[in-house]
Amino acid sequence: MSVFKIFDVAGSGMSAQMLRLNTVASNLANTESVVTNREDVYKARHPVFESILQQTGSMDEVATVRVKEIVEEETAAIPHYRPNHPLSNAEGYVYSPNIDAVAEMADMISASRSYQNNVEVLNTAKQMLLRTLQLGQA
Amino acid sequence: MSVNFDKAFGVHDNALLLFERRTQLLSENIANVDTPDFRARDIDFQQALQQAQSNRLLMQTSHAEHIQPSQQPFSEHVQYREVEQSAADGNTVDLQKEKAAFAENAIRYQTTLHILSRKISGLKSAFKGE
């Protein structure tokens, strides 16, 4: 019964978007996490989605979403000259991650909207299924 | 005159199956709105329903290595959607169009369901002879 597959599809979309929202939260929370070494700095994380359909190309396939990988952004850390900071290195520098807060916020809104769309699909599918169960009862 | 349930429901039972499959395809498009290289799919409604009406013959398999018939209804009518412009990541989902199509499809499904419901209650009252 393919109505139940709609729940799989919308559910997979919701969990993928939720993971995206999680990475956004993690990126935003770590904008001010300073470290002593340039290499240890936090790097912004972004999930890459994929659809199972892309591998087989079969029209029979149910195209659920899944997270293929989480990539770390390779941007140079920002040095700050703070000799009095407890984490500063020998030259008096601390390093903070180079996170684009505005892009993260836009990503957050996009993830939230996509999540809502999936919820809407789920609700409509549920309604359709329940109405079908009542077929011929009235 | 014999009562034939296939004829009693007419085109509507096939239409219901078709709407259901279309709901699934459109929900896949909506769920994959952020998937790189995802190509949106839809079903050619007119063509699929026409063929469903002209007695679909189902393929029988008697051996595990035979070509398996499609697992889902109307798979042979599923096509990639043609779009004017795809996103930079190769995704061809137009969310506004997909949502509109999804809403339209849901209404059509419920309309067909309503018609079927009326047909069943008509049959019921005919059986009771009230």
Image (cartoon, rainbow, N blue to C red):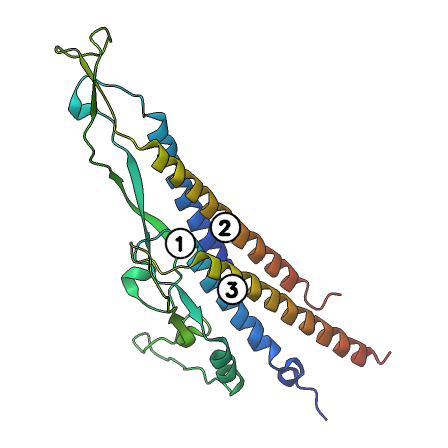
Q: Which residue is at the far bottom?
A: B1
Mark sitting earlier along the chain (1/3): 1
Indicate the amino acid at tag 1: Val
Disc assigned to residue A117? 2
Disc assigned to residue B33? 1
- Element under disc 2: helix
Indicate the amino acid at tag 3: Ala
**Residue B17 % position (x, y):** 54, 72
Question: Does B129 appear above or below A127?
Answer: below
Q: Are marks 2 and 1 in contact (CB under 8 Å)?
A: yes
Question: Does B93 appear above or below B123?
Answer: above
Marks 2, 1 in one chain: no
- Element under disc 1: loop
User: What residue is disc 3 on?
Assistant: B101
Q: Which of A116 and B66 is in front in this view?
A: A116
Residue at (61% x, 77% y) in the render: B12
**Residue B127 % position (x, y):** 79, 80
Marks 3, 2 in one chain: no
Does B114 sit left or right of B96 as displayed?
Answer: right
Any part of residue B95 in sight: yes
Mark 2 to mark 1: distance in Å?
10 Å
Pointer 3 indicates a residue of which chain? B
Residue at (40% x, 61% y) in the render: A62
